Amino acid sequence: MASMKEVLRIEHLSFSYPDGHKALQDVSLVIVEGETVGLIGPNGAGKSTLMLHLNGLLRSNGCVRVLDMHVDGKNLKAIRTKIGVVFQDPDDQLFMPTVFDDVAFGPINLGCDKAEVQQRVAQALAWVGMEGYEKRSPHHLSIGEKKRIAIATVLSMSPEVLVLDEPSSSLDPRGKWALIELVRGLPLTKIVASHDMELIRALCRRTVVMDEGRVVADDLTERILSNESLLRAHGLAPCK
């Protein structure tokens, strides 16, 4: 049984963009080690804004703690090695000429020596089933392959928490289920933001529903997804 070590604590977090739009309103949430938590809600619910607070890309009032470190200037470098965010579009994370260079970028910036960089790249590519792709250009890969490499760029940093934003977007059914199996097998705490209820059901025991910047429900995934009135009230399609 997984220990109950807290990996994430958010208390009374609110955030407004410069145009005055209130993206988060008094959000509180606790996630413990080993959980895979779904984050669902309509467009504009605040899911992406919340995720950007987890590694300090956005900061505001309220408390955000990752592995008992407050997300602030002095802790940002350490936090960003512990919580890995994989964006919806893998091209946002792949910018080097080869797969090896992309996956090695993080470890090199951590100051790892050449041998450790090699080891971390090999391990990360093995986790995502992309061994042998080191010399390939990321820009010539399929969308499914790019998503795997984007995950590898995060895994090479040895994070404890993996945050995935719309991981199944642009994937065909075969690619989606291959990605589900990949993510399911990673021994990390995971937060998965998605509109894909089938993916949420397959991966997440617990699901948090957001709407208009607020947490409106937080329960076992099966209870959330079987509550059609709740889903419809917050612009979500029931999962058949």
Image (cartoon, helix red, strand yellow):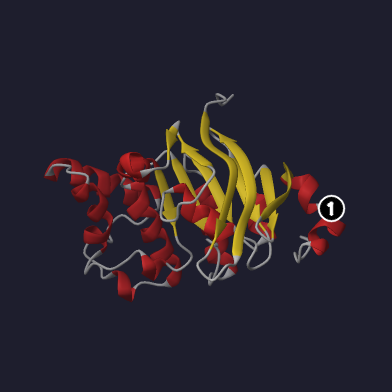
Where is 113 relative to 233, above or below? above
With respect to residue 218, does 86 lie above or below? below
Q: In front: 161, or 23?
A: 23
Measured as percent of width and height from the top left, residue 81 is found at 34, 43
* Left or right position of 26 against 144: right
- Determine if residue 120 is in view: yes
Give 135 or 146, whichever is nearer the viewer: 146
- At a point 62% along the width and 41% down the height, the residue shown is 29
| Residue lying farthest to the bottom in this orientation | 140
Q: Nearer the viewer, residue 190 or 213?
A: 213
Please state which of residues 100 and 88 is positioned toward the viewer in this rendering.
Answer: 88
Using residue 155 as the reference point, say whether residue 200 is left or right of it: right
Q: Amino acid at mark 1?
A: Asn
Check disc 1 and report the residue beneath it: 227
Height in image: 104 above or below 157?
below
Q: Residue furthest left?
A: 114
Residue 13 percent coordinates (x, y): 58, 47
At 68% from the left and 65% from the top, the residue drawn is 42
Residue 151 percent across, percent down from the top left: 40, 55
> Quick one: SS at disc 1?
loop
Q: Is residue 182 visible?
A: no
Query: Residue 189, relative to residue 198: is it above or below?
Result: above
Q: Look at the image and tell me in which quarter the N terminus lies.
A: top right
Snapshot quadrant of residue 196:
bottom right
* In the image, farthest residue toward the right: 229
Say few, some or many: other residues with alpha carbon within 10 Å of mark 1 (under 14 / 14 to 19 / 20 or more).
few
In the displayed structure image, the side of residue 17 where residue 44 appears, left or right: right
